[in-house]
Image: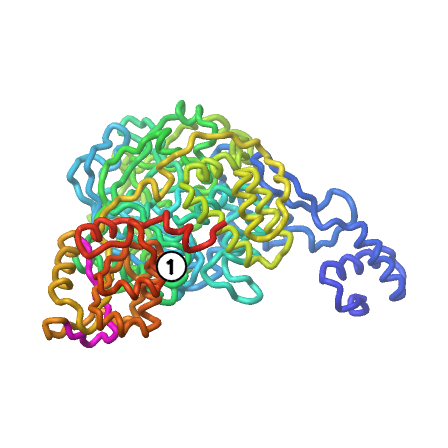
Amino acid sequence: MSDRLPKSLNKRSRATIVMLARRKGEHISCEDIFEIGTTAMADTKEFETERGQGGETHQRVPSTGPQSAETYLTTNQGIPVSDNQNSLKSGSRGPTLLEDFVLREKIFHFDHERIPERIVHARGSAAHGYFELTESLSDVTSADLFQRPGDKVPVFVRFSTVAGGAGSVDTPRDVRGFAVKFYTQQGNWDLVGNNIPVFFIQDAIKFPDLIHSVKMEADRAYPQAGSAHGTFWDFASLLPETTHMLMWAMSDRAIPRSLRMMQGFGIHTFRFVNKDGKSTFVKFHWKPKLGVQSTVWDEALKLQAADNDYHRRDLWEAIASGNFPEWELGVQLFDDEFASKLPYDVLDATKIIPEEVLPLKIVGRLVLDRNPDNFFAETEQVAYCPANIVPGIDFTNDPLLQGRLFSYLDTQKSRLGTANFHQLPINAPKCPMHNFQRDGMMQMTVPKGRANYEPNSLSMAGEEGGPRECPATGFRSFERASGEHEQGDKLRVRAELFADHYSQARLFWKSQTESEQAHIASSFVFELSKVEFDHVPPRVIANLMNVDKDLATRVADGLGIDLPKANPAAKDPIDLEPSPALSIQKNMVETIEGRKIGILIADGTDAKALAKLKDAIIKSGATPFVVAPKVGKATLSDGKTVKADGQLAGSPSQLFDAVAIVLSKEGTEMLLREAAAIQWVMDAFGHLKAIGHTDEAQPLLQKAGVEPDDGVAGLGDDFLAAAAKRFWDREAKIRLLA
């Protein structure tokens, strides 16, 4: 019967008509089919939308009316799913239960969808280094690496983009992974986080949906490495819980200047457990020594063309030159009583505790001092897993964290092809490791003797009996529920405080400078302008109305659409005190240390001025990079030739933190006819960078549209001081922002 229906009907409509016709139990004509079909489609609702206890969106099969079997979500075994938004927990704030076969199947299948490249965080750069403890935490944790100030622990750190593949570019608008493997004397501890302290979702059961939506669209395999497309924003607009993370992702945090100049966060709330078994909640923060620096959007776009490997090259060259990247480790420590007084839930991965509410305690430093010997063997084969923790550190019942504990181990087996991936040198612990796990594909050790089980009594026969458990030093989970609803009935629900999706998004917005707010609004405009579904942008803006009406108005105006009414909030947002710590611009470290300064020269450049400038830049801890029309040589004023570090056409100014134009009158006249030189200067000014110049170079600046301001200087100390900054006040003069 199905083949008698018009091709224009979708699969679901055809199935519903056929089902109803069969129910009628008699032969029917095409005319009857169309009559049944029209009635069926009129009576059939696509889905009903409800809100859960935590404010999450549930799209459900209607409770009444005819429905096709295709409308029912099932597992791979055909078992109908009652809740696709929440994992099964013991109590609304309790741990996720292993018996949740829906969660395990969904994550298991997702983990194996791509081989062998990582599904997320595929493009990465990494380095070896060490963590040095500067203040003991022995009062709150028994973890060995936090006991003795001065102790150093080897680490391997991998940074990554999230959405793009291994061959994508370094500088899209994206979250950056920040994963640290500590090789401690108690085993490996993996702190697997991002450069943003919150995440899009509250429950791990939604992770496959999130990544499916942000990855290349399934039918057309584009766009690559970006969220500016329809499926992502359709998904995000239907999950108000994404709003806080969207504010961060649309901010300059998502377009970092360097991997060395971004923060890192553990995201989740973890536990410290001390030698007496007492628990303290902890959140981890990495703070870069060079401060947080970002690019501007136009600069990020042009960097994708100038150098696909911009961040990877920057990290490698910094370490190779001895400018070792460094971060401080800060912790936020608090107890159950403190957590219970907060207006948000510390188990919610879409929330932060502002530093003004709970200051950071700096306890150590991370230094990266050695590049990998082999990219594949180390950077590609390293396998991080949040479940790798050591005695003295423990998990909480954060439902996103609980799902990650299962997912990473499973996906590493899929990606690396064997359960023995822990034996690869980059993954192997640097402390003794003994157990009874045996065999498996690619077994790299050669166990001796018969002891592959315990208990055993082989020692009584003079044979080696193998290792045994040790209650005194072994890992012990924190045994007690420490908060309300952390144990109880088996439930697929979220805690009520999870329903506040907008208060912290509003907090983030109000904590930014006017310039940063303009960047956020403009980013929303750009991303939503790429969405082909007309109904999605108004829905996003309706969510933003709950954050700030001015923000929503600016986005709507930038798109040229009417301002919609606010979407009903599951929990009314509250006004929280702004947190200046959340602003990049309010916390910039004014230094040129670790920066790269581009110097444009040509034939006739003053040799003494060039040498003096390069020397001053090096003494300030920065790196000079000489650019000339021809890379082979430029003849200076003293008649000597100098080899440039880069050719003008291949070394655009977006590669540098500041630029100096050291030209003679003749050199300027030549470059006034060179479009690449004019663009070089124009981009430096447009990207809000400091520009130093000789008097003779002034005509080139004028032709490039450079207007005098605090960031345009000579070649002396005034230029070096300006090179430590970006000049945000300049932006309103050169581009329109939302």
Picture layout, residue 249 above or below residue 149: below
Mark 1: which secondary structure? Answer: helix
Which residue is drawn at the image coordinates 37% and 29% (left, top)? 357
* Amino acid carrying mark 1 in the image: Glu
Q: Residue 402 appears at what percent x and percent y?
A: 44, 42
Residue 694 left/right relative to 442: left
Q: Is residue 38 visible?
A: yes
Q: Dividing the image into 4 quarters, which one contains the N terminus?
A: bottom right
**Number of numbered discs on residues:** 1
Q: Residue 162 appears at what percent x and percent y?
A: 42, 55
Residue 231 left/right relative to 414: right
Q: Residue 554 appears at what percent x and percent y?
A: 54, 46
**Closest to the observer, 448 or 158:** 158
Can you identify the residue that label 1 sits on?
Answer: 299
Q: State the extent of the magenta-drawn residues as a range.
A: 621-636
In which image quadrant can residue 134 be found?
top left
